[in-house]
Every structure is written in C-alpha cells, then in structure tokens.
Image (cartoon, helix red, strand yellow):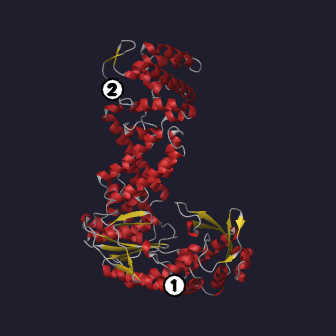
Amino acid sequence: MLFNSVLQSTRVPDDWQTSIIIPIYKGKGKAKSDPSSYRPISLIPVVSKLFEKLILGRIAKFLQLNSVEFPNPQQQGFQPNLSCLTTAFALQETVLYHIERHSDVYVASLDQKAAFDTVRFRALFLKLGRLGFTGPFLRLLMSTYTNLKAVVRISGFTSDTIMVKRSVRQGGILSTFLYLVYVNDLLNDIEASGYGSKVMSICCGNPAFADDISLLALTHFHLQRMIDIVYQYCQHWNVSINVDKSNVTVFTKSRLHPPVNIFYGGCHIAQTDSFVHLGIHYSFNLKNKDRISQRLQKAKNALFSMSAQGVHARGINPLVSVNLYSKVIVPIALYGSELWNNLSKTDISAISCFQHKAVKQLQGLPVPTRSDMAESMVGLNRLPSIIEARKLLFLHKIISLPAGSVSRQLFIRKLILYLNNRTSVTLGFVCDICQILSKYNLQFIINNLMLPVPYVSTKREWKTIVYGTINQSETALWNHRLTIDSDFTFFRILHPSITPSALYEICNRSSDRYMMFIVARLWTRPVVLENRLCNHCKLVYQEELVHALSECSVTSTIRTHFLEQLTDFMLPEEKHSLLALDGVAFSLKLLGAPIEPIFDASTDHMFLRIAFLFIVNCVKVFIG
C-alpha cells in the first residue's frame, strides 16, 4: 500500500531522500587533511532501495514494450551478462582485426572527472523525457531527485544536513540506469559521426563501460574528430575530462611508435606506449609480456601480504593456505587471462613458475622440489590449464549474449572468417579458442552454434564438461610424466592422483607442523638407488630411508616401541599383514601410501599419526 500511495501521489517521503555519508580513507599515503583523500560511502534507507527496484523493473518493461533502443549497443556497463571483460574483448578484437589487415589503430582513453557526481538534475530530466518518460512517471523521478539531502557521519559525529544539487544517488538502485541515460547521447553522437572504427558492418569505435569510454579510429584525423565531438558534448552538458590522466596510444606492428598530436579543446593529450583500461594492460605492440608480468607482480604482492598475516607453512595448514591462494591469489594473477592470446613458451613458463614457487612456499618445501609433486599434493592443476578453462567458460559467456550484443557479433563474424580461411584470423580470441576446443575435442559447441537453429548448452552443463575434460587431460599428462621419470619412483605410489594429500589432513594441528615438514620432504625427495655402506650398522643398503625405517640397528629400539603401540588399536591380523611387507613396501606404508593392507578410516588415521612420529624419530637418530 505504501508503494502504491507513492506511485499515485508521484511524491516520495522526505525520509527516503536523506543519505548518510561515511568517508573512507583511500590510503596510499594520501594527505588525511585533504577531503579528496576520502571515498564517500552513502547509506540510504532500505525501503527506498526496495521502491527503486520496483521502479527499475517497470522501466525495463517500458523500454521493451516501446522498443526503445537503449542503451547504445557499445555501452556494456551495468547490463545483464555484460562485464568489464566483454568490453575489453570488444576493444582488443577490434584492434587485432585491423592490425591483421596492416592498419594502425589510434586509441584514446579518456578519464572523466567524478563522473557520477557531476550529473545535473535538469539535464537528466530532459534526457529522460527524450527517451519517452513523461507524465506521472517522470514527475515521480523528478520528485526523487528534487529534494535530496545528506549528512556526513564520522567518528560518531554527524554534520548538519546539506542539500544535494547534482550527482546520481550513490547506492541507489536507479542510479546506474540514470547515469547511462545521461551519457547515452554522447555514445550515439560518436557512433553517428562515422569516424569510429568498424569490423565489417559492426560499429565498435567507442566501447564503453559506464564512464570508461575508449575511442578507436583508423586515422589520426578521425580520432581527433571523435575527441572534438566529446569536447563539444562535455562543454554543452558541463562534463569534465581529466586531460592529464587521459592518453592516446597507436597500436601498430611496426617497431616504432608513430608520433601523433591529439588535442582536447586546445589541451594536448599525452601519447603513451601502453595504457590500462578496466584493469587490463594494453601495449602498442600487442605483446603479452607486459600484461602478464603486471598481473603476476600484483599476485606476488598479494601473496606477500597474505604471508605477513600468517598464510604460510608455519602459520596454517597448507590445505587452508592453498584454498586461500586459489580463491584470492589466482584470480588476481589471471584477471583478463581470457584475452591472453598467442602465448609464447616464455609466457607460459613465467605463468607456470609463479605457481610453482607459490605452492612450494605454502607447503614449506625446498625450492628444488619437483613442481609436479608440489602442485599435485595440494590438488592443483597447472596454471596454463586453468587459463584454458577460463577461456572456455568465457566462450560460453560470449555466445550466450543477445544476438545484438557487439561482443557476440564480433566473435561470430571473426569465427566465420576463421572457419572459411584460417590464415585470415591469426591473432586474438577466435583462433586461440578454436585451438583449445580442438585440443580437448570440444568442437561440438561451435558446430551447435552454426546450426540453422543454434543450440547453446546451459552454463552449468558447459562448466561441468570443461572442468571434467581438463581434469581428465591434466591427470593423464601428470601420470605420463610420473611414469617416465625415475625421480617419481616412490612418489607415484605415495600420491597416485592430483588430490589434496592425506598427509596434510592428518597433520592438521599446529603441533604437527614439524612432523608434517619432515614427512612432506621425504615424500618429495628424489629416490637414489645405489649400494652404500651404513655408518651405524655397517650393512650395505640401496635406499637410505628404507634402511633407516626397516633394517638399521640404530633405530631398532624406536622401531620396537612403534610396533608395540600398534597393538593398542590394530587387529592381530592387520599387524601381521603389515609386518609381512618387505622393507620398501613397509616404508611406503609408513609414509602413507594407499597400498595393502588397507585399514578402516579411524585405524588408518591413528596408524599414520604414530607412523609419521616414528619416521621423524628415526630420521633424527639416523642422521644424528
């Protein structure tokens, strides 16, 4: 009833129009006395948000019923199923398309000052009217923004009420829609000019994500004309562009970066060799090295910060550490990896080495430890395979977009080119993903897309297929490497699959850390089989650990005590089966190998805890 009453009266209660602003310090050494060093977080009444959600649903129906073309197709901000990554995809694929046709691409990245805070209410209402919002509905929207108020709360103190004269409401459900309305004319004007680049008939010269707008042109003149349009728009609607933070980059196959002079209203825009757009690094020569090294450095910094908080081998269990690594560090390292194409062996090596070092650090393993061992003990696949999985999932995201989506149209057009003539598309996502699909025998998703009535699997179905196929492939490759390398002679018996090691599940207390380190290093050490003379018992042996655990007289007292402890919880026949094993099998069983005799879960857990302690004591005495 309350909402119906508001709709009928076209006025919102005063309480709904008051926001509480909490300033949050940005950090990074900024002056605390400078107001711009704080990020304002706005809290608005929950009932107001619910009402705005109701209004937004009615707006969507209105636009659909009246076939209103909104927003501009190149606007991918705050749109269902679209994201920063689909925007970056459109930009990159457009650039690569023209580079393959031996054309330089001129790109301007413009930085808008306080974009959401500079929206003028009168201009916004005018633009809403042009979209077809009139009568009571427009009056209701005007009422929502006519009397906006705010108070600032900090350190328990609340300021006097201030009137908000401009800006879409931070935290409001309608705010993103209203901002898109405000900037939509600019995108339409740029596209209508015809100066922007095209891929065949697809206009893709101004990919945008909310206030992040890039301009793409094939000539210096066309880029300048597009920027002139932006300047005229900003002057008319009182929008500010930060020229100092804007830049121009010329993508080219040439080793030299062609110099250009681009101006925004008489102010020169700096030309750079690279720029960052929506968190993704772009270099003028399209090399992957810089973007990969940038992401890995961010991931290393994050890993270092986590280590300082106790996320390391001596702090918490490696399985917990690796779970945090997978959920926090890997997404940082691989952000935008869906767009890394034509990776060289050097690129793949750099990516792989990052994880190799990380998993050894989290498990407290020596640097020379074989990486296949370190990764498999915590159940991790190689990073290159994780990147391939991300690309396959992104493929599904692209082909599931609406038919009119710029990103989907770009993909389909370039895919058709590639299928008709593979030499016509050698750079970018299309050729990359087709090679991955072929590698894993998943081409059916493309075949289904090309049917008269295209069929696309559900997201859940495709995700299950992708991870199942890649896990199967990674396991087969891992098993092959273990089979042909003598360093893995014992390890492949101790740990026959890429799953979290039982060692870390058993040694899950802080008091078990030292025991865990010793046993983990024994698991991953290379096996050396050669005749040696024992310094303690003067017997000749081939494998040092096997001799220390099962044969050497210097450890006989510890061994006798260990066998006596087994009687407390083990059946006589189980103990007899254990003692019937030869020295090698006995040692492997003590280390946790899943070989006969197989005990029930509780017995196995108790056995391994005692066995690991026995191993540590034997090693101490034997090494002396």
**Quarter of the rendering containing residue 35:** bottom right
Left or right: 416 in relation to 125: left
Q: Vertical placement of 231 versus 433: above or below?
A: below
Q: Nearer the viewer, residue 270 or 91?
A: 270
Residue at screen point 44% across, 38% down: 377
Q: Vertical placement of 28 versus 609: above or below?
A: below
- The label on residue 237 is 1
Residue at screen point 35% across, 57% down: 443
- The label on residue 566 is none
Res. 195 visible in picture = no
Left or right: 415 in relation to 1: left
Q: From the image, tell me which residue sits under label 2.
A: 528
Q: Vertical placement of 522 versus 278: above or below?
A: above
Residue 143: where, in percent of width, then height?
67, 82
Q: Amino acid at mark 1?
A: Trp
| Label located before the other in sequence (2 or 1) | 1
Q: Vertical placement of 8 versus 414: above or below?
A: below
Left or right: 418 in relation to 406: left
Residue at screen point 60% across, 82% down: 121
Residue 221: where, in percent of width, then height?
32, 82
**Is there CB contact under 8 Å for labels 2 and 1?**
no
**Quarter of the rendering containing residue 510:** top right
Q: Quadrant of the C terminus?
A: top left
Res. 363 visible in picture = yes
Q: CA distance from mark 2 to mark 1?
A: 77 Å
Q: Amino acid at mark 2?
A: Val
Instruction: State the SS at label 1.
Output: helix
Residue at screen point 41% across, 69% down: 407
